[in-house]
Amino acid sequence: MIISAPNVVPSRLLLWAAGVFGVGFLLLHAPEAQFSGSWDYILTHDDDYGYLSIAQGYTQDPRSDANPFYHEERGRTNSSLDYAAVAVVGLLASALDVPVPWLMPAWKILTPLLLWYTLTSCLVRFWQIEVYQAATLSMLLLVSTTLFHGSNQFALLRFPHPGDGMWLAFIWVSLVLRVDAVGRCYPLVITLIACATLIVAPYYVILGGWLLLFMTAWSRVVGPRDNARRHLTPLLIVGALCLGRLLQVIMQVDSSRYLQHALNLEIEPSGVFDVGSLVLVGMVLMAVGSAAQWRRLNLTTMDAALLCILSLEPLTANAQFALGNDHQISLHRYYHLIFEFACIIGWLAEKLPAVLLRLRGTRWDWLLPAGIAAAGTLVLVHPDLNWFRYLPRTDPTHFMTDNDTLILGVLPVLILLVWLPLRHRAVAGWFRVPFRALAGASGERPAHGAIAVDTRRLLHFLCPGEVIHERHG
């Protein structure tokens, strides 16, 4: 049976997602509203209060977003480029003549919905995943962030970052990794997205800029080389834009208390090197090299995605040694968590079918997943390592957690979530998880003698009697 995945998200799926986020908002915040007697106190994160106050400053006359609390500083403002989404919310509240807190329920429902819609659309259009599977995977990736200790639990609902810029980053990453599907307008589209990201959420320019640089080098070494030239033009333009934005910040930082705080200028660097990030990248290098049998011609787009996104960890975790100050770069690595999980899941789904085929009928067919499950259980029961928000931890749940340590802790769960549906038809039938569709979803075949796995036949072998859907065209 052959089906074609639609290029748009059906309205019923959109309504379903809106319902999920609406109910989720009520479950999380209704108890607070009931306790306080007002919906004015539904802040997800302590930073919400600061940005809410700045947005309220846009409703004052004269505008006083620099410090809306003191009469003596009425009329003091900062550049709207410092917090574009906050400025838009404040101006909207002023135009509607309503208090800014009245807009927070809409923000905390519509922003996750926008993220889900964008991620689902990218998976369908650029990665050829069937729309219902893409919708489920997107929902799992987004909602799972609320289950973690540390700042990750606030990623979906925090105002305004990272939600205001994450949807742009979804598009940016998909376009760069799937450059062949874009056409001649690629440099223009990437430049426009980079400009918007630089205004709305500059932190994501680190991700997008590094991806462009990495893929330029990857295309030169691995191929196709023509893509290196296509990446080079937007890379140079994005570099120039970042330089201009940096000069603007340097000129304003002395007079802007907001920038001084945002850049962490008052705090001395710790001087502690993040070893966990190097361990993570080392594991990724070993995994990619082993899967490709250490042959360059066996490397695929998913290998590039995994290496690129995960190699950003040691760079951002140890930014203080290159910049002299962390500037809160390492603290906000959780902005990248959804991208990292998506790359890990996609890479596992592409590589695990070949592993299953080799292990079929051997004792490692059950010993390996049992060992992975034991490792995951050990992490969960250890109070210093546990990542699950509803299990006890040594530190309070809202304390910052190291991003690379979190990824290493969740890795056994991710492996099993991909392994079990591929290996056991009953699991796939009950849960209908979308990860099987990712196997071979890149639509490519390794060139020049590389190991190729016919995913459709393999799935028939592992799941006899199951109807396997293909996408053509």
Image (tube, grey):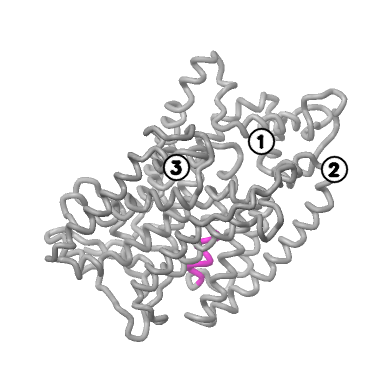
Tell me how far mark 2 sits from mark 1, CA to CA: 24 Å
Residue 89 numbered tag: 1
Q: Amino acid at mark 2?
A: Ser
CB atoms of marks 2 and 3 within 8 Å: no
Disc 3 is placed on an element classified as: helix
| Pointer 1 local density, CA inside 10 Å: few below 14, some 14–19, many at least 20 | many
Closer to the chain start, of discs 3 and 1, is 1
Tag nearer the camera, 3 or 1: 3
Residue underneath mark 2: 255
Disc 1 is placed on an element classified as: helix
| Pointer 2 local density, CA inside 10 Å: few below 14, some 14–19, many at least 20 | few
Residue 204 occupies quadrant: bottom right
Closer to the chain start, of discs 2 and 1, is 1
Residue 161 occupies quadrant: top right
Residue 262 location in percent, x, y? 70, 43
Is most of the magenta stretch helix, strand or loop?
A: helix
Judging depth in this view, the residue of 197 and 66 nearest the camera is: 66
Residue 69 counted in the magenta span: no
The magenta segment is 172-179
Horizontal relation, residue 216 to residue 91: left or right: left
Q: Amino acid at mark 3?
A: Thr
Q: Amino acid at mark 1?
A: Val
- Please name the residue shown 46% across and 69% down the image: 304
Residue 173 counted in the magenta span: yes
Tag nearer the camera, 2 or 1: 2
